[in-house]
Each structure stands twice: as structure tokens, then as C-alpha cells.
Image: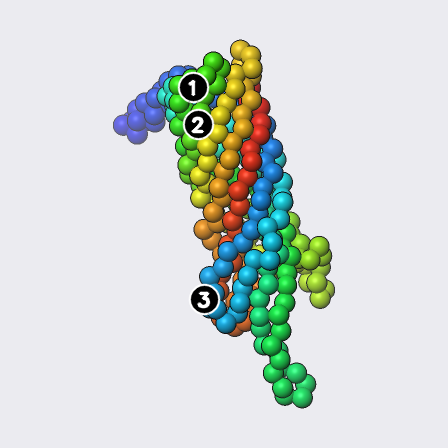
Amino acid sequence: MFMKKIALLMLFLCAGFTSMAQIEIGLQVSPTISGNRFVAEDRYHFEKESNNLRLGVGVIADYFFAQNYAFSTGLIYRGKGAEISYNYTRENADGSVEQIKDKDDLTIQYIELPLTLKLFTNEVAPGTIVYFQVGGSLNTKVAAQVDDKKVINSEKVIKRFNIFEADVLLGGGAEFQMGQSTKLFAGLTYHRGLTDIDDFYEERLNDKNISLKNNGVSLDFGVKF
């Protein structure tokens, strides 16, 4: 009986909180300059050869629990990865050892679930407010290519990448009121990968201390309703 009363009380509080809260749902497009960073010994000479332009697109939701504070989430389909190079040794048939410099152009697509806090200012100009965003995202791998190939040596490339990834997100931007319930927004977000995305290099170089992580900066454009 006691547990039933507690459950009813929790439902009442949640319903009251939801009725007071405001939810804004929108669409977002995010061109992203994507790169990688490494944790590895210098002898492997891991280097980022280039930053690649990737695209993110999806739905966002801002759940306001106070006038200037919102919990922001959504579902974003985003491409990541860049061209990297590294050195490894190869033993030839005659017993000689050869130092090889190799390159891989990595392309991984994720479905991202952002879990962030947005802080909004009051109007800084008529119909214009500034926001700051901090938090993280939990990401699930959905597709991958290496050097524009989905299969290498009869094995699907997607298998070499870890299924899950976690990011830290830091960003900010501005919203522009365009009507009674329509807002346009533009912002800049830094995505810093926290987890190793690929076990391939640890196995190839026989070194468990190697890790490869995503990095990126996105320009965020969208509309909220």
C-alpha cells in the first residue's frame, strides 16, 4: 500500500512537471570538420594527414525546465573520421624486416544521442538570444568505410570499429525569433571523443596502449517549432 502511494505521488509530480515544462522540437544540419587524435608511442608516427568535411543531420528537442534553462537531446546522423598515417614493421619471406608507412582514410557514420544542458540569455537584441551548451553524447556506429571500401580482404570494414562511442560537447550560438513559435538558430560545437573507436591498430601493431579517438567542430544550423 505504501509503495502504491509513492508511485502515485511520483506520477503526480512528473505530470505536474511536464505540464509546466515547454518542449521545442527542431531540425538541424551540421557540416562538421572531422579529425582524429591518437594515444600511441612516437615510434609508430601516428599523424593526422587531413581534416575531412562530414555532415550531420537530425532532430533535436529542447526541454525547458526553467525560463532560461533546457535539457537538450535528439537524434543526429553524423559522419566522422579523417585520413591518418602510421608506421609498422613487416617481416618479408626472406627474413628481412621492412619499415612500412601506411595511410587509412577513415569514414564512420554514427547515430548520436546528445545529452546536454543549454543555458539561454535574455534578449541581446530584439528577437535574438544567445545560448551556451555543455554535456555529452552517446553514439552508435551504423556504417563505415576505409579508403572508400566497405570490404577489405573479404572482411566487412565495419567490424573493425567499436560499436559505441562517447563524446563531450561544448558549444554556443544564437536563436532568432521568426514568428510566434518558429525560431532559427546557428551555432558552433566542439565534439571531443572520449572512447577508443578502433581496435584494429592495437592488434596490427601488437600494442594494447594504442587508442584512436574522434575530434570535430561543427557549424549547426536549424529551425525549431
Camera-side residue: 13 or 25?
25
Q: Nearer the viewer, mark 2 or mark 1?
A: 1
Local crowd size for mark 1, using a 10 Å CA cut-off: few (<14), some (14–19), many (≥20): few
Answer with mark 3 or mark 1, whichever residue precedes in sequence: 1
Residue type at tag 1? Val
Q: SS of the residue at dot 2?
A: strand
Query: In this rendering, is residue 99 above or below 11?
Result: below
> In front: mark 3 or mark 1?
1
Residue extending furthest left?
Answer: 2
Q: Is residue 192 positioned above or below 150 on the image?
A: above
The answer, for residue 148, to whether it is visible in the render is: yes
Q: Amino acid at mark 2?
A: Tyr
> What separation in Å lies between label 3 and label 1 (alpha carbons)?
48 Å
Residue linked to disc 3: 209
Q: Residue at x 48, y 69 (%)?
A: 42
Q: Are marks 3 and 1 in contact (CB under 8 Å)?
A: no
Residue where numbered disc 2 is placed:
131
User: Tag 3, which secondary structure?
Assistant: loop
Q: Earlier in the sequence, mark 3 or mark 2?
A: 2
Where residue 89 sits, quadrant-wise, is bottom right
Residue 83 place in picture, x, y as percent: 62, 56
> Marks 2 and 1, Cα distance to the nearest angstrom?
11 Å
Mark 2: few, some, or many residues within 10 Å (few <14, many ≥20)? some
Taking the image as shown, residue 178 lies to the left or right of residue 172, namely right
Residue corresponding to mark 1: 124
In what quadrant of the picture does the N terminus appear?
A: top left
Instruction: Point out the image quarter for the C terminus.
Output: top right
Residue 125 x, y percent position in the rendering? 45, 16
Q: Is residue 138 visible?
A: no
Query: Between residues 6 and 208, which one lies in front from this camera angle?
Result: 208
* Viewer-closest of 61 and 89: 89
* Residue at the extreme bottom of the image, as rendered: 94
